[in-house]
Amino acid sequence: MNKNDLVNQLAERASLSKGDAQKAVDGVFELITDSLKAGDEVRVTGFGVFVVSSRAGGKGRNPQTGEEITIKASKAARFRAGKPLKDALNA
């Protein structure tokens, strides 16, 4: 499922226009992004938790040239599925 599929199915299930469904999906993604950028976690009860994790920097090698490179530290978004979601997937 891609974003357009998500918008279309939301519009059908919630009896919304596709424009309103698009605004709702975009709004949810923006809110999650803004919260994660602020360093907060986003908990959706019954679904899961979005958190920010830090990756340490280090040394690596360019596989084509063998040259040593420096990998800078970064942050990444992570998702931990909640129990109801895990149960639904394994039912």
Image: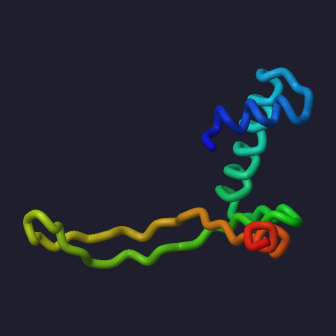
Residue 72 image position (x, y, % from top left): 36, 68
Q: Total label count?
A: 0
> What residue appears at the point 46 percent right and 66 percent down from the top-left corner?
74
In which quadrant of the rendered image does the N terminus lie? top right
Residue under the image location 88 percent in, 65 percent down: 45
Residue 55 falls left or right of residue 25? left
Q: Quadrant of residue 66?
A: bottom left
Relative vertical location of residue 10 with respect to residue 32 in this rendering, above or below: above
* Image quarter of residue 52: bottom right
Quarter of image, res 65: bottom left
Extreme residue in the left direction: 65
| Residue 20, above or below 57 | above
Q: Is residue 54 above or below residue 21?
A: below
Residue 50, image x, y percentages: 71, 64
Q: Residue at x 54, y 64 (%)?
A: 76
Q: Residue at x 82, y 75 (%)?
A: 83
User: Where does the C terminus fall, quadrant-wise?
Assistant: bottom right
Coordinates of residue 29 in the picture (x, y in percent): 71, 45
